[in-house]
Amino acid sequence: MQTRKTVVITGASQGIGAGLVNAFVDRGYNVVATSRQVSASDAFRASSQLALVDGDIGDPETATKVAETAMDRFGTIDALVNNAGIFFTKPFLDYTVADFKRLSSTNLEGFIHLTQLVVKQMLAQKSGGSIVSITTPLIDHPIAGLTASVPMMTKGGVDAISKNLAMEYARDGIRVNTVAPGVVDTPLHRDNPKEFLRTLSPMASISNVQEIVDAVVFLIEAPHVTGEVLHVDGGAHLGKW
């Protein structure tokens, strides 16, 4: 009898994160979901397969609590989705040290704290594993007028470390990939005009949450894909349009 696999999902209370929680529960996984107030979210159904952990992912104690919850409740950690992230735009000269620390805490430090604990557990289990992180095509393909230099410094770090970890742990069967969505119809864009958002890709399209969820599920389960960036962006990474 095959043991049910366990996936950890960060930034899980709404949008893509909540969609991922529901998808993996429906696919028969145990799920440990975390965000600052994930226990207050009404975006998913209660389930014996689901454990919720409140906390700031930038705090190493949150990562410890998440990993311990996974092991205490379900006994393994087989997959991780680093979905938590913050993003805001300003002209480069207007970014403050406080802005950078806030971005770095969630986007980089949160990645390191939890991914280290997950990889350590995967190595102990000797059964491989899969890590997928959410990035953005803006890392390599800026859009004129969308001034996101400092956030992209942090998101670009996730892209770089993911490729390096893919190589470092390839022999251990631990795969590391990223999904780079363009504009997605989530609460993040609630107040942005749809007409403007459609100009941000050559297909003039806005993705729905399910499309991003499907991309993540594919990479989590694809046995021979590692070090990959899967763009779900209506072609925005291709260049000028």
Image: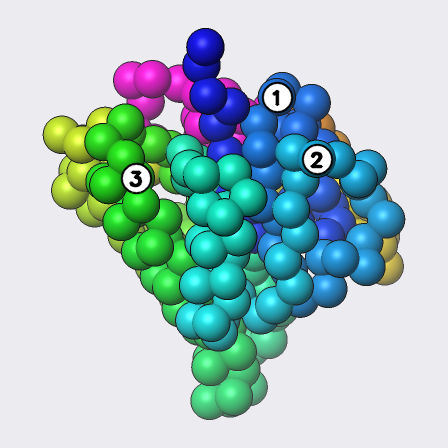
10 sits left or right of 160 in the view: right
Which range is magenta?
A: 212-230
- Judging depth in this view, the residue of 67 and 116 nearest the camera is 67
- Judging depth in this view, the residue of 39 and 233 nearest the camera is 39
The residue that disc 3 covers is: 122
**Residue 57: % across, % down:** 52, 65
**Residue 138: % across, % down:** 49, 51
The residue that disc 1 covers is: 28
Q: Quadrant of residue 11?
A: bottom right
Q: Label 1: state its secondary structure.
A: loop
Hey, what amino acid is under mark 2?
Answer: Ser
**Residue 205: % across, % down:** 71, 32
- In the image, residue 195 above or below residue 55: above
- In the image, residue 214 above or below residue 202: above
185 sits left or right of 166 in the view: right
Hey, what amino acid is under mark 1?
Answer: Gly
Q: Label 3: state its secondary structure.
A: helix
- Return the disc, 2 or 1, that comes first in the chain's sequence: 1
> Can residue 149 be spotted in the picture?
no
- Judging depth in this view, the residue of 207 and 215 nearest the camera is 215
> Can residue 22 be spotted in the picture?
yes
The residue at 82%/37% (across/down) is 45
Q: Quadrant of residue 36?
A: bottom right
The residue at 18%/32% (across/down) is 172
- For the residues carrying marks 2 and 1, which lies nearer the camera in this image? 2
